[in-house]
DNA sequence: CCGTTAAGCGGCGTTTCGGA
DNA sequence: TCCGAAACGCCGCTTAACGG
């Protein structure tokens, strides 16, 4: 079997994600945005905007400062992309709607749970659907509850009856997300036939055909990956993924390789050139596909990464919203960021450097990246707090590199 | 047949931003 | 200045599968 060094695997992954080179100095166009999402396949959404919503941040790390309305134009007006549950809530090329159809009727956890809700309240579900049909796109808060009042949700995850019905109909493909209300926060749902253009909505590839195509897309986006890496990209069942990978290997589309230090075998697309060097620098969203699947991030980068958004404050190790910093072919640091919009300050609440990296090399590159991020967010200044083993060095690099001094 | 690993499932937690 | 509405993933346990 062909052998790959860990460095080769890293460079393959980084190039596949479009993070292998310095970003263009010219202005970012709609074509750049379109190409980037196609390359990634999945653009994970998180609307909670600690810095910027996660999908905007993912694009920023590949493209640099860009006009966020370009993405809204492509998704919600031109309908070149759609929202769908991929590995999580995501933006996808609209052609991929058909590839996920097999699970709109399937028995997987999400569809099943929400389907049970629909079955329990058929009359109310029909009323909600009728309202959307006659009124056009609706957000959950605009639809009355069964008793005629407008419901309040209890906490983040306490959905109203209206929200449950809308999400269930979205999961089974009757409704689609037509747009967003309240500057990106709230989904507005409409009939899928009014959102997803006909050829993409009506095409119905078989389950195995769709899975094969999703596996192709996963491997393309990962560069190289184990069975579990590949299955996770679209959250396909692991067993079925193994069968599809074997088929693609048999057809000569995928090549099986052994990566240095990995127990499980991995696959890549045949004839994929392996970059000899990569030279990018990017602050990654915690939702970035490069580090999204934690076992992979550990295996590939020796980087222990976890979302601590849902961890109670005293138990957090790295911070609330932590961005890994990719420099060349390693993840060298992580920063807990917060955009203080009222004071126009980008706050670095904590900064940690990885054990294998040199703080004196990392700090100037990270400082430059933070300044660019602040500029993009229309914040005037970057301020570094005391927490973390990189804080002092980073603060110094920011002072020294300040063009106003 | 037993030990280990994988899969499945239920419970639980924090912050932003627009508008009144 | 306050209030309402919206945004999923991790941990740990149980059960299933696998391999020696």
Image: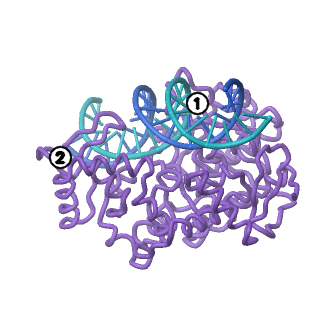
Chain colours: A purple, B blue, C cyan
Query: Does residue A343 appear to the left or right of A387 in the view shown?
Result: left
Residue A24: image location, x then y, percent = 69, 65
Residue A405 visible in the shown view: no
Mark 2, residue position: A145
Residue A232: image location, x then y, percent = 60, 51
Q: Quadrant of the C terminus of chain A?
A: top right
Residue at figure coordinates x 65%, y 55% from the top left: A230
Residue at figure coordinates x 31%, y 57% from the top left: A169
Q: Secondary structure at mark 1?
A: loop
In this rendering, is residue A159 above or below A14?
A: above
Q: Label 2: few (<14), some or many (≥20) within 10 Å?
A: some
Q: Nearer the viewer, mark 2 or mark 1?
A: 2
Residue A166: mark in rendering: none
Residue at figure coordinates x 59%, y 56% from the top left: A240
Q: Quadrant of the N terminus of chain A?
A: bottom right
User: The residue marked by circle 1 belongs to what chain?
Assistant: A
> Between residues A341 and A270, which one lies in front from this camera angle?
A270
Q: Label 1: few (<14), some or many (≥20) within 10 Å?
A: many
Residue A133: image location, x then y, percent = 21, 66
In this rendering, is residue A248 above or below A282?
A: below
* Disc 2/disc 1 C-alpha distance (Å): 38 Å
> Between residues C1 and A325, which one lies in front from this camera angle?
A325
Q: Quadrant of residue A243?
A: bottom right
Residue at figure coordinates x 32%, y 63% from the top left: A174
Number of marks: 2
Residue A226 visible in the shown view: yes
Residues under numbered marks 2 and 1 in contact, where contact means CB atoms less than 8 Å apart? no
Query: Does residue A124 appear to the left or right of A345 in the view shown?
Result: left
Q: Secondary structure at mark 2?
A: loop
In this rendering, is residue A178 above or below A392?
A: below
**Residue lying at the far top of the rendered structure:** A314
Mark 1, residue position: A319
């Amino acid at each position: 079997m062909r052998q790959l060094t860990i460095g080769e695997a890293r460079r393959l992954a980084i190039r596949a994600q479009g993070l292998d080179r310095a970003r263009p100095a010219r202005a970012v166009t709609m074509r750049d945005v379109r190409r980037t999402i196609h390359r990634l396949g999945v653009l994970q959404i998180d609307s909670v905007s600690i810095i910027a919503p996660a999908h905007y941040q993912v694009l920023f790390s590949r493209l640099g400062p860009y006009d966020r309305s370009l993405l809204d134009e492509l998704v919600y007006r031109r309908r070149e992309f759609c929202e769908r549950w991929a590995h999580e809530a995501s933006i996808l090329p609209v052609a991929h709607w058909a590839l996920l159809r097999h699970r709109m009727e399937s028995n997987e956890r999400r569809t099943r749970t929400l389907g049970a809700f629909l079955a329990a309240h058929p009359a109310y579900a029909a009323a909600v659907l009728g309202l959307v049909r006659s009124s056009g796109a609706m957000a959950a808060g605009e639809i009355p509850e069964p008793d005629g009042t407008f419901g309040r949700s209890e906490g983040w995850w306490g959905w109203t009856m209206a929200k449950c019905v809308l999400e269930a109909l979205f999961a089974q493909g009757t409704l689609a997300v037509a747009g967003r209300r309240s500057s990106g926060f709230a989904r507005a749902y409409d009939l899928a036939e009014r959102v997803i253009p006909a050829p993409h909505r009506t095409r119905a590839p078989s389950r195995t055909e769709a899975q094969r195509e999703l596996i192709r897309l996963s491997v393309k986006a990962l560069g190289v990956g184990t069975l579990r890496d590949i299955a996770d990209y679209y959250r396909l069942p692991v067993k079925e993924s193994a069968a599809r990978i074997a088929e693609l290997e048999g057809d000569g589309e995928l090549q099986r390789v052994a990566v240095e230090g990995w127990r499980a075998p991995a696959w890549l697309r045949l004839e994929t050139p392996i970059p000899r060097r990569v030279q990018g620098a990017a602050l990654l969203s915690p939702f970035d596909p490069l580090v999204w699947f934690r076992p992979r991030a550990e295996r590939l980068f020796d980087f222990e990464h976890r979302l601590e958004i849902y961890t109670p404050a005293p138990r957090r190790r790295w911070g609330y919203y932590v961005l890994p910093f990719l420099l060349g072919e390693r993840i060298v640091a992580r920063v807990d960021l917060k955009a203080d919009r009222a004071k126009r300050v980008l706050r670095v609440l904590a900064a940690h450097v990885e054990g294998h990296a040199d703080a004196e090399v990392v700090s100037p590159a990270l400082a430059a990246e933070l300044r660019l991020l602040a500029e993009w967010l229309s914040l005037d200044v970057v301020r570094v707090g005391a927490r973390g083993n990189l804080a002092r060095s980073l603060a110094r690099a920011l002072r020294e590199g300040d063009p106003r001094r």
